[in-house]
Image (spheres, rainbow, N blue to C red):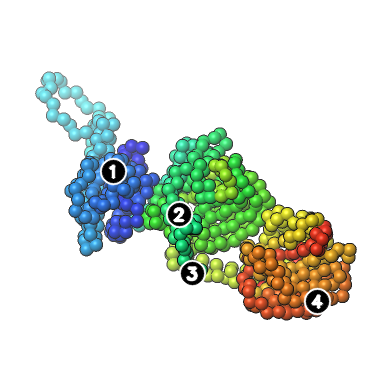
Amino acid sequence: MGYEMLPSFLRRRVLVAVAPDDMQAIELVKAMRALGLTVIIAATIGLASQADDVAVCVVVLHPDRWRSAPSIITAMRRNPRFMIPVLQAPMGLPRAAWATEPFYLTEETLAQTAKALVSMIRCHLQTVSEQEINALIQQRASVHPWLREPEALGSAPAHKKRPRSKLAHYIQLSWPLAFILCISFLTYYFFQLSVTTNTEATTPMATTSTWRNHAYSALVPGQECDPGGADWEIPGYYKDVATPDPATPTPSSPKSVPTPHLVSDNSVVPTCLQDGVMLTHTNHYAAFASMIFTSRGLPLPSHYSTSITATSVNTSKSAIFQLGVRDQSGSDMSGIDFGYGNDALRIGTNGAWEVVRYNNTTGAIEVRYARGFVPAASHYTLAAEANGPAMSFTINRQTVATIIDTTYPDSYGISFGLSDGGIRQPPSALFSHFSYTPLPDHLPKKDVEIRSTADAQANAAAAQLRQQSYQAATPGFGCDHGQGQWQPTDLTGEAVTTHCLARGLSVEQKARVKDMGRVSFYGLNGFVYGNYRVGVDVALKRDSDNWAGLGTRVNPTGSSYTFLVRSDGSWKIQRYDSDGTPHQLAAGRVARRDTYSLEAQSSGASQSLRINGVPVASVSDPFLSTTDHIELNTLPDDKGAAATTTFSNFTFTPLS
């Protein structure tokens, strides 16, 4: 787009090209903004490529860093119309079309340099505006020749003076008035233009009319695939934690945290197809091959909705799709060391999903807000609605989680992608039907008010969730239609199969399988907190010697406390280590029945069991103190015979 064809708000913007993580340059930009100037800070190639689309480009140069900064090189190569050099240390100016002599920037002169820059830029913008006015007047003069001043002519031949018509007389009298009206209109127009520019300096979102403020959709997203003109980016690097070398000694302290390192990744290959863009990752399979619907450094509206459809093309059972709504890679602080933050929905092809927040510095998951399970599939439509700090996420038109997170107040893009650490060849997936829709903003205007309200809501919601009891007449995935999050049994091994019956969940222990059967419960939002009491009715067949019951304090490695009963009335409490080794804590027998009501309680180190409402044991064992999930368990007899158990009337009660 040519400069003259750009909207006026772009023609009057100022872009400052800086090296990534140059804090002194960032402070300079902040000082310029404080003086009322609208400034775009360009620390990435995508933003620096706008250097020829703005009125003024300021380039901050350091003799030791500018050659290795892609953003600075890109801005200079765009050949801006008015380019100002700012030097952080003595150096010779690179060969370029500089418009002025260099300014000098140090910590002591930062304020003075900012003031001088703003003064010169405003003078230049005013000159540009005057030139626009003169050009417009000349254009109008050419369109309306009767408004021009009379030109000096040679002596005309003498002729008889004719009486003037009334029309000519009126035209002669009215042209000064028309000229005055025209000048008044131009003065008013450029006065409004000046007001708009000043408003942009304080609230650019209110006056900038770009695609960010309008609904946008693309069947085939991507820079080379989408003809709609949106900005798309594919990241060229990410943060990762190196796998320790066995030959290299590592600290033995459990508190030591591996330092993430930068990984350059240019192995994401987009392919434009008729029904979507296919992303193929030719290397670094476990990292996300991502595409970003970017805002080029300007925040998206606080309230918007978005969706993307993801389809497996070549993936394994470990494949994960992702939709991120708080991408920070385009913010002012983004660069090599910052800009990895995001709030995102992740879902595997196995149906397991979670909502997470990524750390802005390390790129690692630092908070898991919710998790759960939907039917496994190779095709998902992921959607989200962001309303300030409140975000809701949807899978196949079913809302699965709503969270409140004030960590990243603004979003600088919407990302989606694929990760597959379990495949041995390049994974690929098709992404299609992208949509983005700004929505009315009903949030309080003050940032402090937004944060305090959101934090209060988040704390209240968390407290309510921790205290909420739950019950299900027929537990298990696909059987319990309430809020409970049950994991499908095919994700926990092949020891059992389940069926939903009117009288409860039927769990069939397979023959010649000696592993414990597990039906896992992850609370209401994917987590089980603190101390609790859990109960279930267990129906065992009299001719079977298998065990069945409850598992508490289950952690991801498999450690747990189990409370089991057998058809003959025998019961036992055991602690299982992560390697599957059992430690018996208590045992006994009650009267034989067809159905037993079990109630297990884990409170601190105390583990207790009730059978049919009668306390039978309470032991103290401090080894397991936290809970990843709760289980319904089946354990075959010593012969590994097949058996069927029915679980019903599941209850979960948090304890203070």
Looking at the picture, which amino acid does disc 2 mark?
A: Lys
Q: CA distance from mark 3 to mark 4?
A: 42 Å
**Residues under numbered marks 1 and 3 in contact, where contact means CB atoms less than 8 Å apart:** no
- How far apart marks 1 and 2 lie (CA) works out to 28 Å
Distance Cα–Cα, label 2 vs label 4: 54 Å
Q: Which residue is mark 1?
A: 76
Residue 371 in view: yes
SS class, disc 4: strand
Q: Nearer the viewer, residue 423 or 604?
A: 423
Q: Measured from the top left, where is residue 593 in percent x and y?
A: 87, 71
Asked if the residues shown at circle 2 and circle 3 are in contact, with their CB atoms under 8 angstroms apart, the answer is no
**Which mark is in front, 1 or 4?**
4
Q: Residue at x 38, y 45 (%)?
A: 46
Residue shown at 79% from the left, 62% from the top: 636
Amino acid type assigned to the residue bearing label 3 in the image: Ser
Which residue carries the number 2 mark?
239
Disc 2 packing (10 Å; few <14; some 14–19; many ≥20): some
Tag shown at residue 253: 3
Which badge, 1 or 3, comes first in the chain's sequence? 1
54 above or below 629?
above
Percent x, y of residue 52: 31, 42
Name the outermost residue toward the front. 247
Q: Percent from the top left, x then y, of residue 377?
A: 66, 47
What residue sits right under mark 4 in the picture? 588
Q: Amino acid at mark 1?
A: Met
Left or right: 62, with 479 as reference point = left
Give whichever of discs 1 and 4 has the lower sequence position. Answer: 1
Asked if the residues shown at circle 2 and circle 4 are in contact, with their CB atoms under 8 angstroms apart, the answer is no
Q: Nearer the viewer, mark 1 or mark 2?
A: 2
Query: Are discs 1 and 4 less than 8 Å apart at CB?
Result: no
